Image (spheres, rainbow, N blue to C red):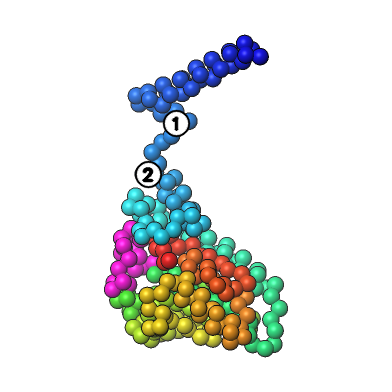
Amino acid sequence: MFVSTMPGLREAALVLVFLAICCKAVNSRPFWCPTDTANSSGYCLSWRLAVEANNIRAWRTVPTQCSRHIEAYMIAGQYQRDLNLIVGSICSYVDTITLSDDGFDAWILDVDDTCISNLFYYRGKRYGCEPFDPLGFRAWALQGECAAIPDVLRLFNKLVETGFKVFLVTGRDEETLGQATIQNLENQGFLGYQRLILRSGAYKGVSAITYKSEIRKQLVEEGYRIWGNVGDQWSDVQGDYAGNRTFKLPNPMYFIP
């Protein structure tokens, strides 16, 4: 047995030596040798996928080398195609639900980059390559110029027309951004929702997951049945009382814990 396996071992060793020589060859990099992907479009595609799958967490900025990739994703059509597919899936789910006649069938939508878009603002921040600027974002939000995300507005109207009580739950500060947010939503066609819930002083400094879980708990205690919950951040759809179904919309520009 030992003698018969020796030729095989020698051949395997020769193959390993050959591969090592190839990988070190000057001006030559065979396809089987690892490559530095940090500056490649392939790396940025993988990074974006990992972010959307929540495998990369607590990231502060988009990698600098991925600015062009994120820009292309957001404005060249793929982001819109992804949204269209996801919202289509949500609408199909909505069609399977039989509402009760007690008025307590509820649906939750996040606001920023779910109902209305901050894409124009983040374009000035290199699509997330620059750190979050609280004062700059507040100044932007106060202008009330966020455009509706068409597919989500279509979903919103379907939910209202079907008879759901739609709650818009946002981490925006109630005191400073409340009126501007109400007006912005109204101007963009978000009419007929049950309630807009903004972050009050009682939740200052609390994580988004904790804050939104507490809001959903209050709604359930009021008797509402949360059939669906849609947001662009994982913190929108994680935590307690998340709902019967949750749907994560794409957003590779920023992360909210």
Residue 247, compared with residue 38, is above or below; it is below
Start-end of magenta stretch:
119-137
Q: Residue at x 42, y 66 (%)?
A: 256
Q: Residue at x 32, y 76 (%)?
A: 138
Q: Residue at x 28, y 73 (%)?
A: 135
Q: Quadrant of residue 106?
A: bottom right
Residue 161 in sight: no
For residue 91, side relative to residue 190 (left or right): right
The residue beneath circle 2 is: 38
What amino acid type is highlighted by mark number 1?
Answer: Cys
Which quadrant would the C terminus be assigned to in this image? bottom left
Is residue 155 on the magenta stretch? no
Q: Nearer the viewer, residue 240 or 42?
A: 240
Image x and y of residue 187, in percent? 43, 82
| C-alpha separation, residue under disc 1 versus residue under disc 2 | 15 Å
Q: Nearer the viewer, residue 142 or 149?
A: 142
Bin the neighbour count of mark 2 within 10 Å (Cα to Cα): few under 14, some 14-19, many 20 and up. few
Magenta span main SS: helix
Residue 162, compared with residue 33, is above or below; it is below
Residue 36, compared with residue 253, is above or below; it is above
Which numbered disc covers residue 33? 1
Image x and y of residue 50, in percent? 48, 53
Residue closest to the far front:
2
What amino acid type is highlighted by mark number 2?
Answer: Ala
Q: Quadrant of residue 177?
A: bottom left
Image x and y of residue 217, in percent? 55, 79
